[in-house]
Image (cartoon, helix red, strand yellow):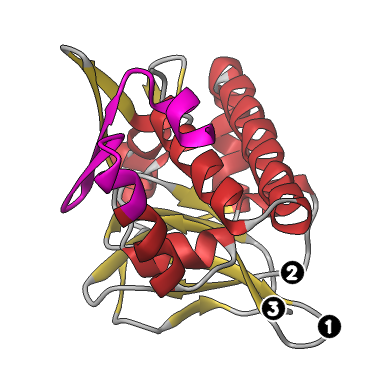
Amino acid sequence: MSNIWFIENVNLFDVLCPHQYAEYKNKHSFRSYIKNDFVYMEGDSSNTIYLIAEGKVKIAFLTDDCKEVTKAVLGKGEIFGELSLLGETRREEFAKALENGTVLCPMTIDILHELMLQNKSLSLKIHKWIGLRIKKVERKLDLLVNKDVRTRLVEFIKELADERGEKRADLIVIKHPFTQKDIADLIGSSRQTVSTLLNEFSDKGIIKIKKGKFLLEETFSQKLSA
């Protein structure tokens, strides 16, 4: 299994954090947030990307009829705000801390451009990562529009297995940071519906649910889709 946040075995958080570079370390500081603090809001200036040192952050936007659509729930070691690199000048989404003690490492686009100019390999990895991130969001929005809740949950679990799964004996173990509420937000459903479906999968013996983990049979994909 591969992890989308580790492109060609490079942890982008470790590579990009300004504290890793002597010339930037003294000019840089981490920022702390409590639960429900906004990191940025729609319409804010888009000139910074953020690396998550601790906690969780939700990325979402509001539709014209004021419905909230969650694009991502991100945890430690993950990155957001990357559309700044593609020419976005004003945020088209909002980012909000989901936990007390959320700590972010902000990096201005100017600093990131300097790092990319100094390291062509890093530049290529970042562009590849952004491309994968955009494809993932596009696929998620397609599922929200065209598939029912059960299918969206099944596809979410399959995606988790591809990105985070580790094969152990005859099981696939997925370590993840998501609560059932997080999952419900991500697939456009309610926590109660997600809980009911996960319990159904558990009763069928397809999936075992533990705190921060899913344990799946190797043949889970066919059984979940049945």
What element does badge 1 sit on?
A: loop
Q: Considering the image in quadrants, where does the N terminus appear?
A: top left
CA distance for labels 1 and 3? 13 Å
N-term-proximal mark, 2 vs 3: 3
Mark on residue 42? 3
In the rendered structure, which disc, 1 or 3, sits on the residue that comes first in sequence? Answer: 3
Question: Front-most of 205 and 97?
Answer: 205
- Reading the image, the residue beneath label 2 is 92
**Which segment did they paint magenta?**
200-226
Q: Residue at x 70, y 37 (%)?
A: 135
Q: Toward the viewer: 177 or 146? A: 146
In reply to whether residue 138 is colored magenta, the answer given is no
131 relative to 30 in the view: left or right: right
Question: Please, what is the three-letter code of the amino acid marked with disc 2?
Answer: Glu
- Residue 189 rendering spot, x and y as whole percentages: 55, 68
Q: Which residue is mark 1?
A: 64
Q: Position of residue 206 (x, y in %)?
A: 31, 34
* Distance in Å between CA atoms under marks 2 and 3: 5 Å
Q: CA distance from mark 1 to mark 2?
A: 13 Å
Whether pointer 2 and pointer 3 mark residues with C-beta atoms closer than 8 Å, the reply is yes
Q: Is residue 30 visible?
A: no
Toward the right, the furthest residue is 64
Residue 224: image location, x then y, percent = 46, 35
Q: Residue 182 appears in which quarter of the rendering?
A: bottom left
